[in-house]
Amino acid sequence: MSYRTELMTFTVKQGMEAEAETWMRILTERQAECVQTLDRERMHYESIFKSFEGGRMRLSWFTVHGLSGERLRSSPHPIDKLHLEYWDKCIDTEVPAERLKHVVSFLPESIRQAFEARDTP
């Protein structure tokens, strides 16, 4: 398999919930810019979910991406730089990220082939 499926959840710092909401609003409003950054990361699909646990806001990223993509922190794109500024401001690194173990994916052959074609540099 030349792609990875991940689901990771991060806790928002207490008191930074409004900033996290602003962050998500910016990403939503600038969605076209975000999509333009995906090729360099070999990101085939990315979704962000919001939840609350124990009174804390949590943001979860579901991604399907190739194995040869560039790292987000090396991105020259202004939207990625803004995304990382909010990440550093809002994500509570004192709380370990939750990474769910991938078990199985069900994917039509045509989609799998498209993923593999996009992952070829």
Image (cartoon, helix red, strand yellow):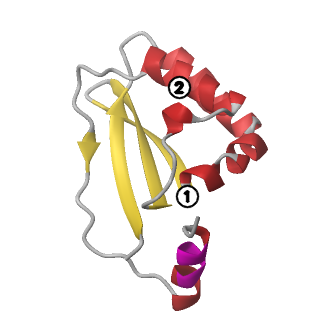
Q: Nearer the viewer, residue 52 or 2?
A: 2
Q: Nearer the viewer, residue 22 or 102?
A: 102
User: Which amino acid is tagged 2?
Assistant: Leu
Horizontal side, residue 27 vs residue 115: left or right: right
Instruction: Name the residue beneath numbered marker 1.
Output: 42
State yes or no: residue 7 in magenta: no
| Gap between marks 1 and 2 measured at Cα | 18 Å
Q: Secondary structure at mark 1?
A: loop
Q: Quadrant of the N terminus?
A: bottom left
Q: Is residue 25 above or below residue 40?
A: above
Instruction: Name the residue beneath numbered marker 2.
Output: 84
Task: Say the numbered circle drawn on residue 86.
Answer: none
Q: Dot 1, crowdedness within 10 Å: few (<14), some or many (≥20)? A: many
Give yes or no for contact between labels 1 and 2 (Cβ–Cβ under 8 Å).
no
Q: Secondary structure at mark 2?
A: helix
- Which image quadrant for residue 86? top right
Give, as a single range, the part of the protein colored magenta. 113-117
- Residue 45: where, in percent of width, then height? 56, 60
Q: Quadrant of the C terminus?
A: bottom right
Which marked residue is nearer to the observer: mark 1 or mark 2? 1
Question: Upstream in the sequence, badge 1 or badge 2?
Answer: 1
User: Which amino acid is tagged 1?
Assistant: Arg
- Residue 83: where, in percent of width, then height? 58, 28
